[in-house]
Image (spheres, grey):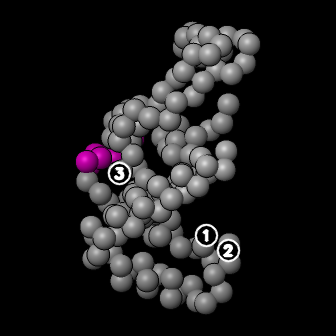
Amino acid sequence: MTFTGVLTTSGSLIAVIAQLARHPEYTSELLEEQNDIGDNLDSAAYKRMVKLDSFIRESFRYTTDTIFHPHTNVTKENVVLSNGSIIRPGEEVYTNFWDLNRGHKAQDDFDDLDTFKPFRYVGLNKQATKCSSDYLFFGLGR
């Protein structure tokens, strides 16, 4: 689990830095937001940096576009999904991140899913650390 955590964290950081390098025009706005918060960068301060959070979430959404993240049924029981599909012990299920992040069914609030818009989530109460049915970057467990 430690390796997975390090891999996820480093990959996430690379995605954010790569988008910032591709779009340096947003650097001053992100820096201004941080400067407005002040020097005391505690957890409450990070929660107020909504532009940075949106930039991070959009970086994850925009760069995660593969069928990825296998989940194996490690129990001795069948897992029955809400649609009736059965996952037998030892079988794997893969998440289609392209459809989740670029498909209009999961991202029904947006029309321009092939465009990187770093402040897309500002004011929408969709943090980069909160998983949901339209955002599974870290997985939902089980």
Secondary structure under the numbered disc 1 in the rendered image: helix
Q: Can residue 109 be seen in this view?
A: no
- Measured Cα–Cα span from mark 2 to mark 3: 27 Å
Tag 1 near tag 2, CB within 8 Å: yes
Q: Mark 3 points at which residue?
A: 62
Tell me, for residue 47, which label it has, or none: 1
Task: Answer with mark 1 or mark 3, whichever residue precedes in sequence.
Answer: 1
Quadrant assignment, res 77:
top right
Q: Is residue 131 left or right of residue 31?
A: right
The answer to whether 134 is drawn above or below residue 88 in the figure is: below
Q: Label 2 sits on what residue type?
A: Ala
- Measured Cα–Cα span from mark 1 to mark 2: 5 Å
Q: Answer few, some or many: residues within 10 Å of disc 1's Cα (few below 14, many 20 plus, some between 14 and 19).
A: few
The answer to whether 128 is drawn above or below residue 38 in the figure is: above
Q: Label 3 sits on what residue type?
A: Tyr
Magenta span dominant secondary structure: loop
Q: Is residue 107 left or right of residue 8?
A: left
- What is the magenta range? 106-114
Decide whether residue 111 is among the magenta residues. yes
Image x and y of residue 130, in percent: 59, 51
